């Protein structure tokens, strides 16, 4: 696979992963009723959920940079 195609596929995959992840995080927040919890628990959830997408995105970016 050429680097150009790899970057195109990776960019599309990143968009899909972020969209699916954000919807999943929202569904989990609704199921757990995070908005009705203690404010510190709500803050903790949103911090963790807001940063957790970085792990798969980093792996995709690492894959995109292979030559």
Image (cartoon, grey):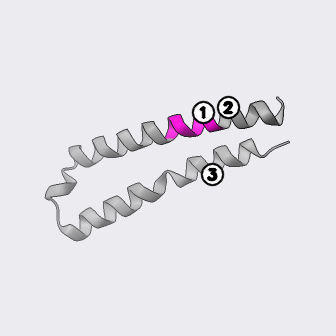
- Front label number (1 vs 3): 1
Judge from the rendering whether residue 17 lies leftward or rightward of residue 35; answer left or right. Answer: right
Residue 3 part of the magenta segment: no
- In the image, 50: left or right of 6? left
User: Residues at badges 1 and 2 in contact (C-beta under 8 Å)?
Assistant: yes
Task: Look at 17% across and 67% down and name the residue there.
Answer: 38
Count of labels in the image = 3
Q: Residues within 10 Å of mark 2 (few under 14, many from 20)?
A: few
User: Secondary structure under badge 3?
Assistant: helix
Marks 1/2: CA distance?
5 Å
| Residue at screen point 73% across, 43% down | 63
Question: Taking 44 as reference, is 54 left or right?
Answer: right
User: Label 1: which residue?
Assistant: 12
Q: Earlier in the sequence, mark 2 or mark 3?
A: 2
Q: CA distance from mark 2 to mark 3?
A: 15 Å
- Image mark for residue 49: none
38 is higher (above) or lower (below) than 19: below
Q: Which residue is mark 3?
A: 58
Question: How far, Cα to Cα, is label 1 from label 3?
Answer: 14 Å
Residue at 16% x, 61% y: name it.
Answer: 37
Q: Quadrant of the N terminus?
A: top right
Secondary structure mainly formed by the magenta segment: helix
Q: Which mark is residue 9?
A: 2
* First in sequence: mark 1 vs mark 3: 1
**Magenta part of the chain:** 11-17
| 18 with respect to 7 (left or right) | left
For residue 35, above or below residue 30: below
Q: Quadrant of residue 30?
A: top left
Q: Percent from the top left, x then y, of residue 65?
A: 77, 46
Image quarter of residue 49: bottom left
Q: Residue furthest bottom?
A: 40
**Disc 1 secondary structure class:** helix
């Amino acid at each position: 696979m050429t680097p150009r195609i790899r970057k195109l596929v990776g960019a599309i995959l990143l968009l899909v992963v972020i969209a699916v992840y954000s919807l999943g995080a929202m569904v989990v927040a609704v199921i757990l009723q995070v908005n009705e919890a203690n404010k510190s628990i709500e803050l903790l959830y949103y911090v963790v959920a807001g940063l957790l997408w970085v792990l798969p995105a980093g792996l995709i970016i690492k894959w995109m940079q292979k030559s």
